[in-house]
Amino acid sequence: MKILQVCSVITFGGGERHLADLSRALVQRGHEVYAAIVPGSPLSAELPFVPEEHRFALSARNYLKNLIGLARFVRAHEIEIVHAHAARDYHLAALAVRLASRGRLVLTRHTLFPLRRINKPLLSGVARVIAVSEAVAESLRQNGVVEPAKITVVHNGIDVDRFNGAVTVAGTRDGHFPMVVGTVGHLAPIKGHDVFLRAAALTSARRRGVRFVIIGEDKSAEMGHRRSLESLVAELGLGDVAAITGWRDDIPAALSSLTMFVSAARAEPFGLAIVEAMAAGLPVVATASEGATEIIEDGVSGKLVPADNPEALAQAIDALLDDLDERLRLGRNALRAARERYSLERMVSDTEQVYREVLNHDAVEQ
């Protein structure tokens, strides 16, 4: 198949990792992968296997140039599938397919935010919308912009083998100090890092020798989220035990330094960082967000606590810090669940099947 991946995002997060991993695997399976991306973006650097002649350079400012050029690109390369991954690109991809009079449009929805109803006429021609979780799929169904029959759930997948080295280190923590409790996610209120820090303050008041780390990038223009969290660290007196490291490219290595992983998100459409922690064999404590409840079986592959409740989060953290056997049990179960349910191979196969169904439907209609 000839597949064009479209993404104009110039930062790098879970959605962009999803696109890069998917594209690499599709090339390995013999498909022709093309990419419409912003030159010089972090995503561009993650696609070295896509040759220059298979790339379309998206302008950061000129929408009309993007539209006309992308439609010509689709026609010239006889693209069969146009797959847009960010909401900001849905319009562009939909109009380019119409203008090119070829290719089938597939969208991936990574968030719980409802699509604006004004999008309904433009997206009427979409062949399929891939939701990364059941929660996202239900949000789309309730929203009514896309026909329910066109919505398919394909859970995000990760390259679990990237985390093999982390399992041994995390799994052999024997309760000796220092123990490290960490979380990964971009710095934004929805991620609940303030709740994580308040739980850290409660835990630190009860016990010594535990460090807390937040790994994540502030994508806001003024870096206001990071400044707010740094102020909270000072207010809570956590300067000696809590750190905000910024983003790290070596997430497997970062996870290998942790005793346990915490997600304090107020809402989470999927929870890629949770799955990565599970693949690293880490015990996970997570707030009962939409994505976390879909991923974690409470008491089996992790612990779930109420959202926005620092005391409940701290109690769960304390209980696991006191119980090495329980940490190891949860870590083993988490690793098994990650390998069985969230492998990259499974995600790619499911996405490939969506592409085939879309094209086969066209063949039957003709």
Image (cartoon, helix red, strand yellow):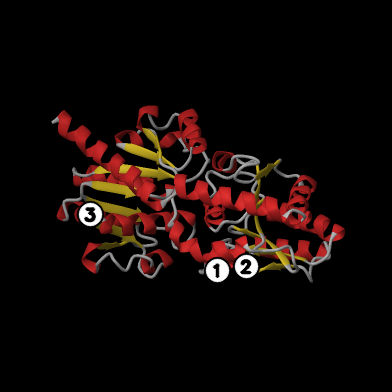
Category of crowding for the residue at label 2, using alpha-carbon neighbours closer than 10 angstroms: few (below 14), some (14–19), many (at least 20): some
The image's mark for residue 31 is: 3
Q: Which residue is mark 1?
A: 253
Secondary structure found at label 1: helix
Q: Of the residues shown, which amino acid type is indicated by label 2?
A: Ser
Which residue is found at the position 38% from the left and 46% from the top? Answer: 346
Q: Are marks 3 and 1 in contact (CB under 8 Å)?
A: no
Circle on res. 360: none
The front one of 16 and 326 is 326
Q: Secondary structure at mark 3?
A: loop
Q: Give the label on residue 257, or none.
A: 2
Residue 32 visible at all: yes
Q: x, y (%) of residue 177? A: 75, 68
Residue type highlighted by circle 3:
His
Furthest residue to the right?
A: 205
Identify the image quadrant of residue 207.
Answer: bottom right
| Contact flag, marks 2 and 1 (Cβ < 8 Å) | yes
SS state under label 2:
loop
**Residue 232 lies in quadrant:** bottom right
| Farthest residue, direction left | 366
The earlier-in-sequence mark between 3 and 1 is 3
Image label count:
3
